[in-house]
Image (cartoon, rainbow, N blue to C red):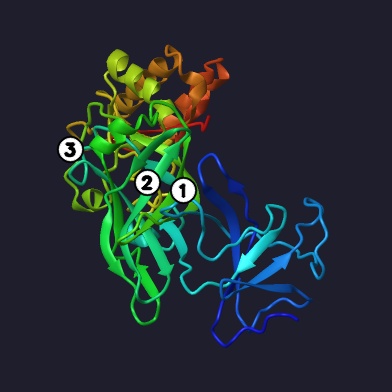
Amino acid sequence: MPYTLKEGEKIFLGFSGLHLENYYYNYYTQSYTSSNWPSGPFSIIKEGGANYLIYKDDGLNTGDIEGITKFQFIQHQTLTHKTPDNTAVLGVYNYDKEFNVVAYDNDYISIDANLKDIDKKDKKHPLQYISIDSNNTHFGGKTKVAADVVITGPADKLIDTVTLEMTQGSHKAQAEEVVGLKFGANHTIKLKADSFDFKFTNAEIAASGIDFSKNGVVDFSLVAKVGYSDEEFSVDIGSAEILTQYHLPRYQKLNDRADRKVGGDDWVKPDIIPALKWFSSHNKFEYGDASNMNGGSFKPDHASHRKGLSVDTYVRGYNHKVKDKNGHKKIEVTINGVKKIAKAIDNSPYQDEIQKIYISYSKTVKHFIEHQINHGHSEYKLFSDHVGHTTHFHLEFFDV
């Protein structure tokens, strides 16, 4: 007969597969309580005093055990659990290596985690980008990652360490561990993004072998180790695109307290670094605002500067604020500056990587740009009028 759940009790449904070469169970979990228990008959067997629910994996397994029925699987999360003796997994039972088995077990530990941006304004937003650089000059050489974490388990368990792991293929970096967490009477441990960050050190990034020299993606998992044993639980919690620091001459010092609170303003997609270096060495371009650590919103509010593709830039000679002795703007200074920028872009091997150049201009400058376009100078098509770019210009790169 179907197992009857008690109020507040959970049973975990999962797809289990035993990999003998490394003694890990990889399976998906979905929890149900008495309020949302699925309908239909399930087989219950007794093993070691625990109740085990058995259902047949739809078409993937063969065999015949009386009472087994199919169940529509719902994916929730991937969980890996390693035990000290490498032979058993709490809460999951594998029956004859042919059938998916689900167990209710009082010792079961579950993990729910979500990564967030470190900017307070973005604490509710999922992490999309991760700043990786072995020479990171912010936060004492550490990359911060905010996280909401809820670990559920028995009150008598001690979580020895919790850490965030970042992987790229076979390369792995581990954030500094959080130690000595204990479940309370409510059976939960909580870490909140608005007051907690995981931290990856420069040394850990360097030792990991993760490649941040080109655009790419890294994956994250949260790992919890149970105290006084070698039990280890981990859950996959998403991925993020890589940003890296540009480490090039600046036209303004990084002394804004708001920038420092969000890990600087000099993070970009790795694939635009060669272009920035080329313009710096060949045209003496200097740089300012790009993106904050881990991307996201940029203060004051910008639609750009969020994805590591926007870089404020300065070159000597471009200044729309220069005035003559009568207080009138010297338009020729702006036009000469625009010419200088256009020539630099046109003579570079990176023209096709630049989507737009934001500047602030008057009608006279607009007419000059249109005249150049009409006479076949296609590089002038890149210029776009944007408020706030009178003493510097803005390079917006394509995402490649």
The Cα–Cα distance between marks 3 and 2, rounded to whole angstroms, is 20 Å
Q: Is residue 142 visible?
A: yes
Question: Toward which corner of the image does residue 143 lie, by quadrant?
Answer: top left
Badge 1 is on which residue?
128
The Cα–Cα distance between marks 3 and 1, rounded to whole angstroms, is 27 Å
Residue, x 50% and y 63% (percent of image)? 90
Q: Nearer the viewer, mark 3 or mark 2?
A: 2
Q: The residue under label 1 is which amino acid type? A: Gln
Q: Is residue 305 visible?
A: no
Q: Which mark, by number, is residue 362?
A: none
**Disc 3 to disc 2: CB gap under 8 Å:** no
Left/right placement of residue 242 relative to residue 289 reads: right
**Disc 2 to disc 1: CB gap under 8 Å:** yes
The crowd level at tag 1 (other Cα within 10 Å; few <14, some 14-19, many 20+) is some
Task: Provide the secondary structure element on which disc 1 rests.
Answer: loop
Q: Nearer the viewer, residue 117 or 348?
A: 117
The crowd level at tag 2 (other Cα within 10 Å; few <14, some 14-19, many 20+) is many
Disc on the earlier residue, 3 or 2: 3
Residue, x 22% and y 31% (percent of image)? 250
Q: The residue under label 2 is which amino acid type? A: Asn
The quarter in which the N terminus is drawn is bottom right
Q: Which mark, by number, is residue 294?
A: 2
